[in-house]
Image: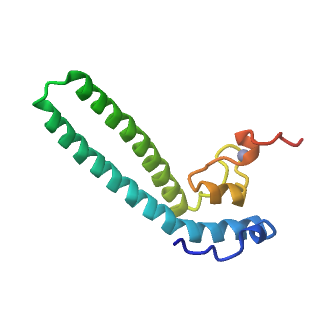
Amino acid sequence: MATPFPVPVPQILDIPSESARTLLLNYLRPVALKKAEQLLTLLDRLGAEHAANLSSLASTDDRPTIAATAHNSAAIAVILRNALAATQQALANMETDRWGFCVKCESYIEPERLLAALTVDTCCTCAGCRPQVD
Ligand SMILES: [Zn+2]
């Protein structure tokens, strides 16, 4: 069961942005560390399972199945590596206190957006989720 967030989520929208960012940072850093650990474990497991699958298929000379197995493993590995890279970047940004700021306009990223995806690096305006206000 997930640890409950220290402040009810709707209330976080009513507190100043820096306070919300600090709360989220402290809450999500261990979540990011755990996620990176889990992704590394999945990549290790995928590599081991891929090697075992290819080993068991090698004697069958079933080239289409061997090719499909290799293709599927490679595709999953790309997804896992991309997720790991994004998580590691979020952790690096947390360590250097850049996490929670939009990489395009440098404003605070909306707390609900960070809660939904701790690897997000743009605010909703820059990401195009809502029209820019002039
Ligand atoms: Zn922005």
The answer to which of 112 and 59 lies nearer the viewer is 59
Quadrant the C terminus occupies: top right
Residue 101's spot in the image, x, y percent? 66, 54
Residue at the far left in the pictured view: 59
Residue at the far bottom in the pictured view: 6
Apparent side of residue 129 relative to residue 42 in the rendered image (left or right)? right
The answer to which of 2 and 58 lies nearer the viewer is 58
Where 82 sits versus 4, above or below?
Answer: above
Residue at x-position 30% and y-position 28%: 68
Q: Quadrant of residue 88?
A: bottom left
Residue at x-position 19% and y-position 35%: 54
Residue 110's spot in the image, x, y percent? 72, 56
Residue at x-position 52% and y-position 55%: 90
Residue at x-position 44% and y-position 47%: 85
Give the image's coloring scheme. rainbow
Apparent side of residue 65 relative to residue 33 in the rendered image (left or right)? left
Where 105 sits versus 118, above or below?
Answer: above
Q: Quadrant of residue 72?
A: top left
Residue 92's spot in the image, x, y percent? 49, 57
For the image, the number of numbered tags is: 0
Residue at the far top in the pictured view: 64
The answer to which of 33 and 57 lies nearer the viewer is 57
